[in-house]
Structures are given as C-alpha cells and as structure tokens.
Image (tube, rainbow, N blue to C red):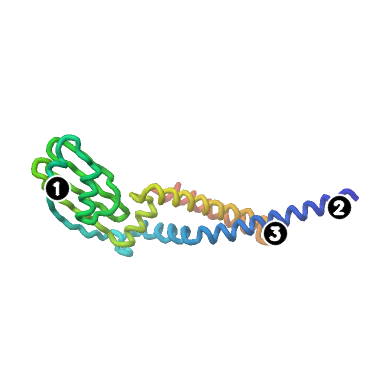
Amino acid sequence: MKSQPRKRGTSLLYRKSAAAFRWCHIYVSMLSFSALMFFAFTGITLNHPTWLGASEQVVEDEAGKIDVELLGDGIDKLEIAESLRETHALKGRVKEFEIDDFECMLVFKGPGYAADVFIDRASGNYTLTKTTSNAMSVMNDLHKGRDSGTGWSWLIDLSAGLMMLMSISGFGLLFYLKKRRVSGVLTAVVGTVAIIVVWVWLVP
C-alpha cells in the first residue's frame, strides 16, 4: 500500500523532468538557431578564406591637412580622431594613438576594416591608408570577435552558453528515449573519440 504513492510520485517526476528537458531543448535551440548557423557557416569560411573571397582587400590612399594648433602640447586625441573620422567617413574605433616629437599615428579598426593615419606635427599634413574587405571577411572577423567591441563579445559568450545548454539538454533528453538511449550515447562517444584522434594524430 505504501509503494503506490511512491510510484505515482516517481512517474510524475519522470514526466515533468522529461517535459522540462524537451522544453529547454526546443526553445534554446530556436533561440540560438541564428547564432549557431552564423558561427557554423563562418567556421567553414574561416577555414577556407579563399572560397568566397574573404581574403580580398581594397586599399585606398588619401591625404589631408589638420590644424597644427591641435598638434601642439597637450594634444586633444579625441578632437583629432573625430575630425579625421568626419572628414574621411572613417569607421571602427581608435585602436592605437601614438605620439612622438615629430608625428602622430592613429589606427582605426573594425571588423574587416582598418585605417592608418600618419600626421606630421610640424605641418599638419597627414596620409591616410584605408583597407576594406568584403562582407565575408567582416563576418569572419565577427566570428573571431576581432575589433568588434564589448557588446559583440558578450553576444559571442551568450551564444556559446546557449549552444552548450542546447547540447546538454539534448543529451539529457536522450535518457528518456529508451529505444535510442544506447545508440545515442554510443554516437556521442564516437564523435568525442573522433575529435581526440584527429587532435592527437593529425594536428601538427
């Protein structure tokens, strides 16, 4: 008589936990679908950068002159950078700003983009070299989080967490499928062993 409530409770817990794993797997999969497809696709294009022209670049040289008053003692880095940005429609963030007795050097960086500026402090004359890449290169840089800012870095971390949760919930759900349990676990083991074998034996 005492075992019946225990069985009923165990059955209820079983159904609820199975439903929780199923719910988690479905909705986490849908939430991370776009991120998973993006990082999977750009993983391939990173491995083969010549396939879609990601290695191609366009280099442009420009020149100009900046007010020498901005280049004296107590250089206003922000005003110089924003003046150059407005004049030449520069993108990205200022990654480097170096100053010596003779010149200033600025580097603007963004995904698939770079602009190097060299300013002569005595005359205010400067040269600018812009290097731009196509959309595929931009996507590859976004995959790596290169020069993409803090917000995108957080998105990468969140996407990775969701993908891990999706995998864990899928693995957990497998244990509620009696007919697929053994074959599913064996498949996971084979996949893990394959990664280790390639790493140990084929990676130089």
| Marking on residue 13 | none
Mark 2: which amino acid?
Gln
**In-image side of 8 versus 201 (left or right):** right
Q: Label 3: which residue?
A: 178
Q: Is residue 166 above or below residue 81?
A: below
| Marking on residue 66 | 1
Q: CA distance from mark 3 to mark 2?
A: 23 Å
**Mark toward the viewer: 2 or 1:** 1
- Name which quarter of the figure residue 142 lies in: bottom left
Q: Label 2: which residue?
A: 4
Rendered location of residue 82, percent (x, y): 24, 49
Mark 3: which amino acid?
Lys
Rendered location of residue 83, percent (x, y): 21, 49
Instruction: Determine the secondary structure under disc 1.
Output: loop
- Name which quarter of the figure residue 173 lies in: bottom right
Q: CA distance from mark 2 to mark 1?
A: 86 Å
**In-image side of 153 versus 55 (left or right):** right
Instruction: Determine the secondary structure under disc 2.
Output: helix
N-terminal label among 3 and 2: 2
